[in-house]
Image (cartoon, rainbow, N blue to C red):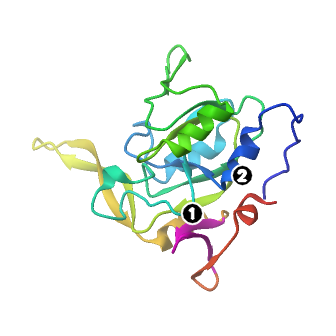
Amino acid sequence: MSQECPDTLPDEFSVRHFLRDREALLIHFSTPMSTQKWVYPDDLRNARTLSGVSLAFCTIQAGDRGPSQGADPGSANACGSVGLIVDIDDQGCVLRVGPTDDGSHEDPTTGEFASGGLEPTPASCARSLDGRQTMNEWRVKNYRTIGLFVFEPIKVRKKISMSDGFGGCIPSEYEDDIDLADVVTDFPDLRIFSVRNGSFQQYDRSAESWSPVTYDEILGG
């Protein structure tokens, strides 16, 4: 359950309130573009532990679709099938926003941050949602994990060892299909959400079924 964030002054722009007005979830997806050090589910487990480190997020609304839904993965509104839903404060959490993949990154050696996005303002945040053709990118840090989000069918990146032909092994990566049951097992402590039939849905682990849920119920009020 998220903690309620303090309200900002009336004349200040609240990114958090903007997201709530638009009913847009901030989600960090497990993707092939993630750091090569981690693959699913360890990439998301590691992301839950980070503090002061910025990661790439997409905004997802109830009518959006994932990369494994439809004929063209490149036209999807997300860069992955499973990810972390987070909540934020207004002060310093959102660094950059953009309507496309902005190629933002943090140099692992210097710690310097580079992004093609813009600072979060009413105009830039609105453009990041209204102007997107596929997925957008928000660079976010100091977030709080709310739950897990999935687009079914679920595809994730995994590691495999392949023979090098000389008695050794070569590490490699591949994309694999996994079941919702795998996600349930991999993250036993998190609520699981999705979009189905144009609405947000929550997965009931006991009943093994989906049911509609409001945006506010996901974020905790």
Q: Report the residue at 72% width, 39% height from top.
A: 15
User: Looking at the image, which residue is at 10% across and 44% down?
Assistant: 165
Label at residue 5: none
Q: Nearer the viewer, residue 61 or 217?
A: 61
Residue 62 - label: 1
**Crowding at label 2, few (<14), some or many (≥20) Cα neighbours within 10 Å?**
few
Spot occupied by residue 95 in the image (x, y as percentages of width and height): 63, 28
Name the residue tied to disc 2.
21
The stretch of residues the image draws in magenta is 191-205
Q: Marks 1/2: CA distance?
A: 13 Å
Q: Earlier in the sequence, mark 1 or mark 2?
A: 2
The residue at the far bottom in this view is 207
The quadrant in which residue 138 appears is top right
Q: Is residue 179 magenta?
A: no
Q: Is residue 145 visible?
A: no
Q: Amino acid at mark 2?
A: Asp
